[in-house]
Structures are given as structure tokens and as C-alpha cells.
Image (tube, grey):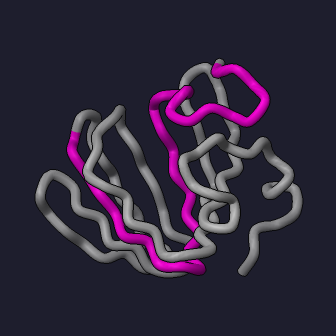
Amino acid sequence: MPLPDFLMALPALDIPFAPDVVEGRAMQTEDALLVFFVFHADVDLPPHSHGAQWGTLLQGEVEITIAGETRRYGPGQSWDIPAGAVHSARVRAGSIAIDAFEEPDRYPLFGQTAV
């Protein structure tokens, strides 16, 4: 299930992955960043932490370790990562996720400065 054209037309994120590996399209406010992630290849995200994050998987499979606890997620399942919690993830190619970050500048938008 590809995302609709109007979502893929949202501003692209400046993330540390090539667009043929991961695409991120975002809506940014003064209070949060909402991101639509499309994974074209398998991705391993190393352990890291930041402000609170909530996400849900639309398609595919992701394995997330949050504060030492690992869980697999499938379509329709959601995760809640508390602010400061160390977490990592393995995401399968073909996965599509929506993530909301409490930090509006978690990732910069291409060609724009953070709100």
C-alpha cells in the first residue's frame, strides 16, 4: 500500500539515509514533528535517545528495543517511547510507519530551517 501522492508531496526530511533506502515526509508544527517513513531497504537503527516518540506501523515489520525490552510490531500496532529512553530498531524493507516526535526539530526538512 503506497502512501497517497499528497502525503508523498509533503516536505522531505534530511535524514541520514539515501532516499532509495528510507524516505521521510513530514508535517512540522511549533510543538511536534509528524513523519511518514517509507523503508525501501532493511534498516538497523543503532541505540539512541531523544524526546518522546509515538509511532504506528501501517505496513511491514519492525523490531524495537526500548530500555532493554525488545518487541516485534506488525501492521496496526503502535509503540510509545518515553523521552530519554534508549532505543534501537530493525525495520524490514517495504515497511511504512508514522512517527510523531515531541521535538519539532528532531529532523530538519530539506531546504528549510527548523520551526
Left or right position of 99 against 78? right
Using the rendered image of the protein, determine whether residue 75 is visible from the camera's viewpoint: no
Q: Does the magenta run of residues contain 65?
A: no
Quadrant, the N terminus: bottom right
Quarter of the image containing the C terminus? Answer: top right
Q: Give the x, y percent position of residue 89.
A: 34, 63
- Quadrant hosting residue 12: top right
What is the quadrant of residue 41 in the picture?
A: bottom right
Q: Is residue 79 left or right of residue 41?
A: left
| Boundaries of the magenta span | 85-114
Q: Is residue 73 left or right of residue 20?
A: left
Image point (35%, 32%), residue name: 51
Instruction: Find out whether residue 98 is within the magenta segment.
Output: yes
Q: Residue at x 44, y 71 (%)?
A: 91
Q: Main secondary structure of the magenta part?
A: loop
Location of residue 87 with respect to 110 vertically, above or below: below
Residue in the picture at 61% in, 20% down: 30
The image position of residue 56, as x and y in percent, is 48, 62
Is residue 59 or residue 86 the one in the foreground? 86
Residue 87 x %, y %: 26, 52
The answer to whether residue 72 is above or below residue 22 is: below
Residue 83, quarter of picture: top left
Residue 84, image x and y in percent? 24, 34
